[in-house]
Image: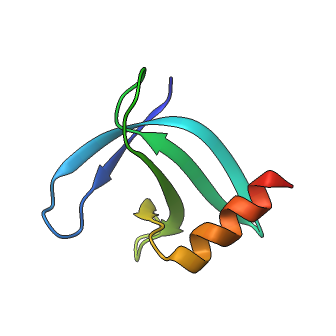
């Protein structure tokens, strides 16, 4: 299973996530990830963005409005 490493912007802690699903909406790439490969664990949605060096960087989608829009798009 594919993994990505996410760096918490507040603590600078590196967290390894397992990618369960990947999709593109309006040209933006989103990842549905979990902390554990199997079993129950927290799940998150990451949005791909480019940093100032055009490197691939992911940020957590935490805004309720954006989360609801993503869920609506994924259900269709």
Relative to 22, is 50 above or below? below
**The furthest residue to the front:** 40
**In the image, 11: left or right of 50?**
left
Relative to 1, is 64 above or below? below
Q: Nearer the viewer, residue 43 or 8?
A: 43
**Residue 58 in which image quadrant:** bottom left
The spot of residue 10 in percent (x, y) is: 17, 70
**In the image, 29: left or right of 54?**
right
The spot of residue 5 in percent (x, y) is: 33, 44
Q: Residue at x 50, y 23 (%)?
A: 1
**Residue 55 in which image quadrant:** bottom left
Q: Residue at x 53, y 62 (%)?
A: 47
The spot of residue 15 in percent (x, y) is: 26, 45
**In the image, 23: left or right of 20?**
right
Q: Nearer the viewer, residue 27 or 11?
A: 11
The spot of residue 50 in percent (x, y) is: 49, 69
Q: Nearer the viewer, residue 11 or 54?
A: 11
**Residue 68 in which image quadrant:** bottom right
**In the image, 74: left or right of 58?**
right
Q: Residue at x 12, y 63 (%)?
A: 11
Q: Residue at x 42, y 64 (%)?
A: 60
């Amino acid at each position: 299973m594919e993994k990505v490493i996410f760096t918490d912007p507040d603590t600078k802690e590196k967290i390894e996530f397992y990618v369960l699903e990947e999709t593109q909406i309006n040209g933006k790439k989103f990842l549905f990830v979990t902390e554990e490969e199997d079993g129950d664990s927290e799940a998150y949605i990451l949005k791909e963005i480019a940093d100032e060096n055009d490197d691939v960087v992911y940020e957590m989608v935490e805004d309720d409005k954006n989360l609801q829009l993503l869920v609506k798009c994924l259900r269709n």
